[in-house]
Amino acid sequence: MRVLVALLLAVAPTAVSAQTAAAPVATVDPARLVAARRVVDTVFPAAQREAMMSAMVASMGQSTLAAIQQQPDVARLMTAEPRSRPVFERFLQQQQTKTTALIQANIPGMVDAMARAYARRFTAAQLADMQTFFETPTGQAYVTQSMTIMSDPDVAAWQAKVTGASIATIGTDVQQFVRELMALAPVSKAER
């Protein structure tokens, strides 16, 4: 059970990072922001945003599932208790569904954040050059294919490998973390 809890902690590392406060950022030149919004709208077309994000989350979910199922402790659990496989798969599917819904509900904020990020990093001239490129046939091909790159078999295999390596160490890391926290526990009067 301890291994499963550790694995579940590994599945949701973004939950912790999503709750951290963002540092204040510098204001953005309004002209650059307008140009950046055009680029973002071209690279990330409004009509395709939900499908693109769903495909990305699904790809990452499949890589995570494959990596977790290949872990020796999980493989032993699923062999010893075959009923655990559908429970585990259902849990991951529920998490993927929740993540997809959360991301889709927040796409407008993501698009705004992306536009501001582009506006901070690129000059108006660079943004105009990007816009020109993305309107070409090659640029449109890039726009169409760029979001599907994460589901490419080579990229998916890399994701599974990295996720597996991360999961392989989480049990030891969690144990060390708990030991360090326990060492901080106040000493009671009886123990003094």
Image (spheres, rainbow, N blue to C red):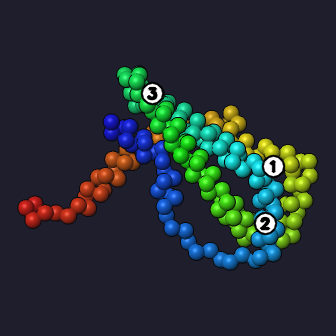
Q: Residues within 10 Å of mark 3 (few under 14, many from 20)?
A: some
Task: State the residue in front, 45 or 18.
Answer: 45
- Location of residue 62 with respect to 56 vertically, above or below: above
Count the marks: how many?
3
Q: Nearer the viewer, residue 136 or 173?
A: 136
Q: Residue visible at 37% across and 48% down?
A: 174
Residue at image point 35% right, 53% down:
177
Q: Residue furthest toward the left?
A: 190
- Quick check: 117 above or below 54? below
Q: Which residue is mark 2?
A: 36
Q: Residue at x 86, y 54 (%)?
A: 134
Choose top left, top right, bottom left or bottom right for residue 96. top right
Comes first in the chain, label 3 or label 2: 2
User: Which x, y percent locates residue 23?
Assistant: 56, 72
| The disc label shown at residue 143, or none | 1
Looking at the image, residue 70 sits to the left or right of residue 141; the answer is left
Percent position of residue 70, x then y: 50, 30
- The answer to whether residue 38 is above or below residue 145 is below
**In the figure, is residue 29 to the left or right of 166?**
right
Q: CA distance from mark 3 to mark 2?
A: 46 Å
Label 1 Cα crowd, 10 Å radius (few <14 / some 14-19 / many 20+): some
Q: Give residue 32's mark.
A: none
Residue drawn where x is 57% and y is 39% of the image: 61
Assess whether mark 1 and mark 3 are in contact (beta carbons under 8 angstroms): no
| Mark 1: amino acid | Val
Quarter occupied by residue 37: bottom right
Residue named by callout 3: 85
User: Considering the image in quadrants, where does the N terminus appear?
Assistant: top left
